[in-house]
Image (cartoon, grey):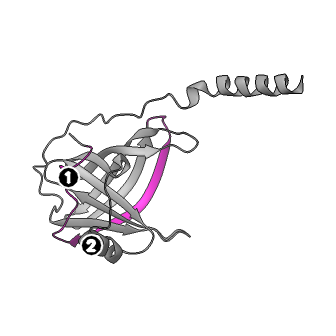
């Protein structure tokens, strides 16, 4: 009898979790459009560091074809450059890639993120304020569930010729 009750609980547990993993990842809403603006530089990357307890460093790369790449690190931009030069970084996660466009003094990025407590990739919309061609302020990210994450990160430009290939992966 205990065995039957145990099996019944397991079956009910699986039935209750059925919809938890069958949701498909979100897709991007932006249309890939080449950047014709001279408001940002494309001959390198923008980096920022967090003053939080995690001391994270982030890298954002913007391409002429309208593709954007972002990568979070725990160390420094030199680690990013060295790993890229040695071919040790893999860029096969759609969480790193997205699309962007520049409108006046704002940059808008459409990408992917994971909402806390979920098991799928959510579409994100991020807004940046362009101060000049070497400085951008990261303001906020909106997720597809309506939640908003505010930021106050200053992105600084660093010239660097070797960048991840924007045509090799996710964005069509």
The part of the image, by quadrant, that contains residue 6 is top right
The location of residue 54, given as percent across then percent down, is 53, 68
As drawn, the label of residue 4 is none
**Which quadrant does the C terminus fall into?**
top left
The location of residue 92, given as percent across then percent down, is 32, 51
Q: CA distance from mark 1 to mark 2?
A: 18 Å
Q: In the picture shown, does residue 156 fall above or below 26?
A: below
Residue nearer the viewer, 129 or 167: 167
- Nearer the camera: disc 1 or disc 2: 2
Disc 2 residue crowd, few under 14, some 14–19, many 20+, Cα 10 Å: few
The location of residue 25, given as percent across then percent down, is 41, 34
For marks 1 and 2, the one nearer the N-term is: 2
**Residue 157 visible to an observer of this rendering:** no
Q: Residue at x 20, y 52 (%)?
A: 166
**Residue 69 visible to an observer of this rendering:** yes
The location of residue 18, given as percent across then percent down, is 59, 25
In reply to whether residue 19 is colored magenta, the answer given is: no
Residue receiving disc 2: 86
Residue receiving disc 1: 166
Residue nearer the viewer, 75 or 158: 75
Q: Which residues are magenta?
A: 144-170
Q: In the picture shown, does residue 14 fall above or below 28?
A: above
Left of 118 or right of it: where is 65?
left
């Amino acid at each position: 009898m205990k065995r039957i009750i145990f099996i019944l609980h397991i079956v009910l547990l699986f039935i209750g979790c059925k919809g938890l993993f069958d949701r498909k990842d979100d897709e991007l809403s932006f249309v890939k459009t080449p950047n014709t603006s001279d408001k940002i530089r494309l001959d390198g990357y923008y980096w920022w560091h967090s003053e939080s307890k995690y001391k994270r460093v982030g890298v954002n790369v913007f391409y002429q074809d309208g593709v954007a790449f972002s990568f979070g690190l725990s160390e420094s931009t030199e680690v990013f450059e060295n790993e890229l030069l040695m071919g040790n970084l893999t860029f096969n996660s759609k969480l790193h890639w997205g699309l962007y466009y520049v409108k006046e003094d704002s940059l808008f990025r459409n990408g992917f993120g994971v909402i806390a407590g979920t098991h799928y990739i959510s579409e994100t919309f991020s807004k940046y304020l362009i101060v000049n061609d070497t400085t951008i302020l990261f303001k906020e990210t909106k997720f597809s569930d309506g939640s908003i994450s505010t930021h106050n990160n200053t992105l600084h430009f660093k010239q660097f010729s070797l960048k991840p290939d924007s045509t090799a992966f996710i964005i069509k």
